[in-house]
Amino acid sequence: MIIEQGRVLSATERWAEVEAGGSGCTSCGTAHSCGIPKEGKPGLHGRMVLRLDNHLGARAGDIVDLAVNSETMATAVGLVYGLPFLGLILGMALGHTQGAAGEGLGALLGACAGFVAARLVGEHIPSGVRMLAIASRPQAHGIPQPIYFQTPLFKEQ
């Protein structure tokens, strides 16, 4: 499990939108092959927004500790990439009897079906990220403490 910090952008009683950085990515075993944008890559902001269950009662501006389950994330990434690829191969195999044009069309339709399947399956897989604790609240005058000044927590369990 990787421990990361994020900043709550908006929150309701049920959900919180949390901006998570890429600072914990260096401790992840799959950092070299991950497709999540990292800081330092030109043209990419290196941050992502997650919609998480707000069981802690977090408010906008709070800095929260996040637990990232690397096994669940690997499964989700495998499905997101694997189902379209499987659809592409199956579509191409089914279209093989119709010649080259049939293979191409079958591959295209199979890949599209794989993307749709990945989207539907992805909605039922837990994200692998959950809020652990509220690390800090905004300062008294209403300006949130920026995530960039927080000490990153790198833990691999």
Image (cartoon, rainbow, N blue to C red):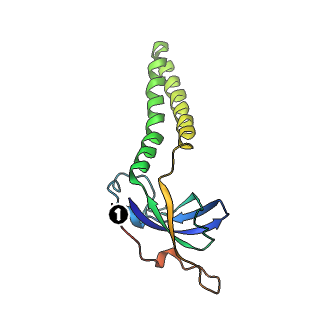
Please tell me whether residue 108 is drawn above or below residue 127 in the rendered image: above
Judge by depth and name the residue closer to the eye, 132 or 148.
Answer: 132
- The residue tagged 1 is 26
Judge by depth and name the residue closer to the eye, 112 or 124.
Answer: 124
Q: Secondary structure at mark 1?
A: helix
Please tell me whether residue 108 is drawn above or below residue 42 in the rendered image: above
Q: Are there few (<14), some (14-19), or many (20+) residues within 10 Å of tag 1?
A: few
Q: Residue 19 in the image: x percent, y percent?
A: 54, 65
Amino acid type at mark 1: Thr
Quadrant of residue 67 in the image? Answer: bottom left
Looking at this rendering, what residue extends furthest in the top direction?
97
Question: Which residue: 53% across, 43% down?
Answer: 122
Q: Residue 144 in the image: x percent, y percent?
A: 59, 79
Question: Which residue: 50% across, 51% down?
Answer: 127
Question: Which residue: 49% across, 14% down?
Answer: 98
**Is 1 positioned to the left or the right of 80 in the image?**
left
Question: Which residue: 45% across, 24% down?
Answer: 90
Looking at this rendering, what residue extends furthest in the right direction?
12
Screen quadrant of the N terminus? bottom left
Quadrant of residue 49 in the image? Answer: bottom right
Please tell me whether residue 129 is drawn above or below residue 81 in the rendered image: below
Q: Residue 70 in the image: x percent, y percent?
A: 39, 53
